[in-house]
Image (cartoon, rainbow, N blue to C red):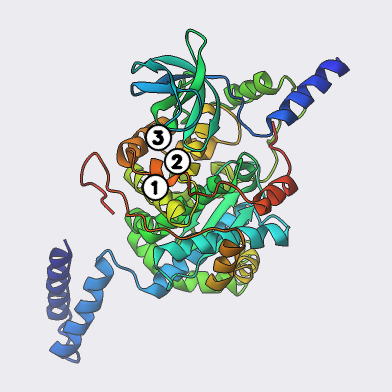
Amino acid sequence: MKITSRKFALMALSAALLLSGCKTMDIQTAVQHTGNLARSFSQDVTPQQEQKMGDDSAALLLGSAPLVKNAALQRYVNQVGQWIAGQTGRNDIEWRFGVLETNNVNAFAAPAGYIFVTKGLLQRLNDESELAGILAHEIGHVLKGHYVQSMLKKDRAAALGGLATSIAQSQGKGKGEIGGALVNVSRGVYSSGLDKDDEYQADRIGVVLAARAGYDPFGLPRVLQMYAVSTGQSGFELLFSTHPGADERLEKLATAMGDKFDRLESGSLKNTAAFSRQRAAVGGPRH
Amino acid sequence: MILSRLITTLMVASLGVGVAWAENATLTRASDLKAKPFTDAPTVISLPEQSKVQIVGNEGGWTQIRSADGKTGWVRLLNVRPDSKGDSGAGVGKGIASLGNVVRTGTTGSTATTGVKGISQDDLSRATPNFQELKRMNENKVSSREGERYASSNRLKARNVDYLEAADGPTKAN
């Protein structure tokens, strides 16, 4: 695929040079040019591009629902999240966590290390190992570049070229506008969700990272079981329309996990006083 | 009326979670019903695959269930699948969703969440990026050292656990 794109780009460039009769560009420049062109056709993005994708996506989610105004709560999820993220060995990623002020039940990741959990989901959790499983699942999405790939798939040019519009927006230009090309790509991705296989993979990573961090590895499966019995409840609409069914997710996890994690249960932490305190602070779920 | 509301409120409060258990479920694998949520606990009865059960609650990797013949005990959580309620969840109508809530809580007073800002497809389609809030989120970031301090003060110890392969094919191996 990469080779084909590169060849195609070379051919296209050669054709363009011939047609334009361009003589100022020597062959060395042409090759460099084509190299860049070919790279942008590949699956990879530069760290700067991923950062921009993450910033715009995170800002969009925060534009939909702001952070819960509770500094202690936000610090708490950052502490728990940072500890779990430490188990990935990816210290080059800047991991940032936030609780969103909405009764909708969901969790999100964005490129470059942004992780979100909604207040509505937090209100339905029983202990810290469940929160750990959710954060670890989202960390898995970032690790595997799921949102980056999904955005590239949706609109490669917009996903990679949104830099100019985004800077204009962050500087307050274009205020009142609903967003640039990159923002609209992420709007589409968060509305339609990731591939099913991405979700199954993030579930597997989530269980492993939570276990590595010392938590009860069954926190995430318990959350999935809660999802499974919450079918039809309001607040779950986007979660259910963008994810495979909780039953299928449980089945995939059951097959992948086997009985490998049963022995880890005894030495695992289920809950902390900090979780119970923060859980109480956000109040009960709305029915 | 007031009394029934009070009872409802107490019931909801005592649940403490968003899930009303006593859900119908099916065992996806043959399972030993254990007297306690431990592998070496006595087996009450062996239940075959596809047994219809009711979920009573969860504890770690275990689900407490009631069997069709009224026996209560614990089976592995991953062997239990809650029965779907007629819809897989995708595209559930608002009417059905709110009806579910009415049935669940017995009150209509606090079901309405429409109008509340949130993250639905509609909210996303209208949202404008909020870079001020993004700045705040970035300021909330803690160091990895602070994460480690949190872990040690809660007696969380890192363990070696291998990543899992997808069991059903090489589509997305880790």
Q: Residue at x 87, y 18 (%)?
A: B2
Identity of the amino acid at label 1? Leu
Residue hosting label 1: A194
Which mark is on residue A242? 2
User: Are labels 1 and 3 assigned to the same chain?
Assistant: yes
Given residues A174 and A205, the one toward you in this image is A205
Please give left or right for residue A69 compared with residue B67 in the image. Answer: right
- Against A49, residue B50 (above or below) is above
Please give left or right for residue A116 compared with residue A44 in the image. Answer: right
Q: Crowding at label 3, few (<14), some or many (≥20) Cα neighbours within 10 Å?
A: many
Residue hosting label 3: A250
Disc 1 + disc 2, Cβ < 8 Å: yes
Q: Gap between marks 1 and 2, in whole Å?
A: 7 Å
Q: Residue at x 59, y 68 (%)?
A: B149
Given residues A238 and A274, the one toward you in this image is A274
The x and y percentages for residue A200 are: 36, 43
